[in-house]
Image (cartoon, rainbow, N blue to C red):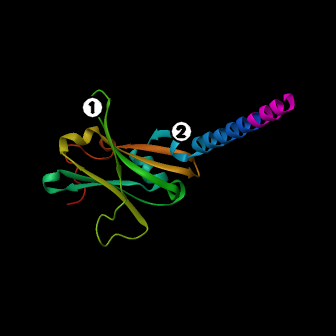
Amino acid sequence: MQRQDTLMMRSMNGRRRFAFSLLTLFFLALVANPAFALISVGTLTKEKAKEKYGITMHARKNGDAGIKVWLQFKKDGWLEKFTYAELRMKDAKGKHLLSARLQPNPLHHRQSDDITTVSFSADRDQLQKCSFLVVCYNSNEGDVGYYLNVRDFLDLKHPVTNE
């Protein structure tokens, strides 16, 4: 009887070890997922965005939607691993109001295939609160993101760069 109890306890210990190992592997896979990774985030100035990364920001009138603002860049260097872009808005005190993921789309049908464009439209009075967040995982700079504040790139009194 004692031998049977010993075998049963060994069996239960083996199952516990197996369950613990499986749970550990699941946790490691979850943590290793890039969606949960921390990224380094900074802010780009207009000059650094253009000179170092080839990123430009433009704006034009967009009917009832206000002003269309867009970023253009080639997927070179750090941007070769472009992962996503977001529109971010803050209130006058810097408190986060909203964020929305932006889909890369050609701005017009004649746009070159090697140019990536992300855009949003907003009322002219809201532009000072808006920024783009551009994120690249596994880039030559690591997992990084940069804020590009609209107010740093466009003249907010006359934001239209293209008619």
- Quadrant in the picture for the N terminus: top right
Q: Residue at x 18, y 45 (%)?
A: 123
Which residue in the structure is indicated by mark 1?
A: 91
* Element on which disc 1 rests: loop
Kind of residue at disc 1:
Asp
95 sits to left or right of 10? left
Label annotation for residue 149: none
For residue 6: magenta? yes
- Towards the viewer: 51 or 132: 132
- What predominant SS class does the magenta segment belong to? helix
Q: Which residues are magenta?
A: 1-12
Residue 90 percent coordinates (x, y):
30, 34
For residue 4: magenta? yes
Asked if 92 appears above or below 116 in the picture, the reply is above
Could you give the CA–CA distance between mark 2 and mark 1, rounded to whole angstroms? 25 Å
Please tell me which of labels 2 and 1 falls first in the chain: 2
Q: Marks 1 and 2: in contact by CB < 8 Å?
A: no
147 sits to left or right of 36? left
- Quadrant in the picture for the C terminus: bottom left
Q: Residues within 10 Å of mark 2 (few under 14, many from 20)?
A: few
